Image: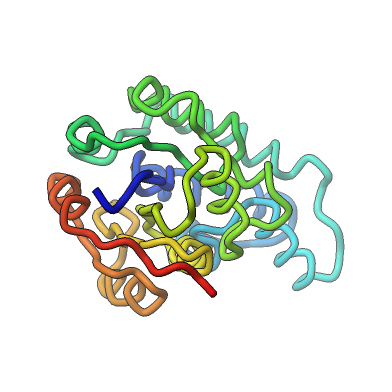
Amino acid sequence: MPIDLIIFDCDGVLVDSEVISCRAHADVLTRHGYPITSKQVLVRFLGVSEKDARRMVEQEIGRSLPGDLEQQISAATLQFYASDLQPITHVAAAIGAIDLPKCVASSGTPEKITHGLTCAGLYDLLAPHIFSASQVARGKPAPDLFLFAAKQMKVPPERCLVIEDSVPGVTGASAAGMTVLGFHGGSHCPPGHAERLRAAGAGSTFDDMRQLPELVRRIEPARPVR
């Protein structure tokens, strides 16, 4: 097969968590004097690491936020996960139907990724090949995390297929020279999201995980970046 590795984003691709994460993020930022709704968080920070989102807010308000802001957001998110988190519908069956190496490359913290996958019953399907933006200098939309994951898995970037739900994620994977499929079946995806993913570089888009195994079989590898 032309693809040797499938790289999954986590939030919004494996677990239907973006709405939950945005609610936690909004609650914490509002508590620290930056009023924002969960919908606004979704629009501004979807696919962006908490560290990079923090930098954006601090630049806007001209002051530093608490040093443990990311920990506060993670704690609030994990609290919501325990009661509200669900896997993306049919994703476990899709993972099982694809007979290729797989890994996760997510903007979340390692604790958040592990807890989310565990709550959704997906951790054992993908562990230990789980990579976080905290392991690289630049998060999405930079290509660093995708290149790091490919290097760890010993697969050339042009032989990787990335499944992403966010514009920053699609942008980063495309910049890494990887083929990208855009998923827009999460509860957070607004009308027109598929078009935004394609504009960012997704070769194809889909909204039902039952479609993924066949899409993988049909895909052609991206050409190496020169």
Can residue 24 be spotted in the picture?
A: no
- Name, please, the residue furthest toward the top: 124
Q: Nearer the viewer, residue 200 or 52?
A: 200
- Please indicate whether residue 78 sits to the left or right of residue 159 in the image: right
Q: Give the residue at x 60% y 33%.
A: 110
Q: Give the residue at x 34% y 56%.
A: 188
- Name, please, the residue furthest toward the right: 63
Q: Nearer the viewer, residue 36 or 188?
A: 188
Q: Nearer the viewer, residue 226 or 55?
A: 226
Q: Give the residue at x 51% y 71%.
A: 225
Instruction: Give residue 27's position: percent from left, percent from top.
Output: 59, 48
- Please indicate whether residue 67 sits to the left or right of residue 56 in the image: right
Can residue 56 be spotted in the picture?
A: yes
Instruction: Give residue 123's position: percent from left, percent from top.
Output: 40, 24
Instruction: Give residue 93's position: percent from left, percent from top.
Output: 18, 32
How many numbered discs, if any?
0
Instruction: Give residue 176's position: percent from left, percent from top.
Output: 52, 63
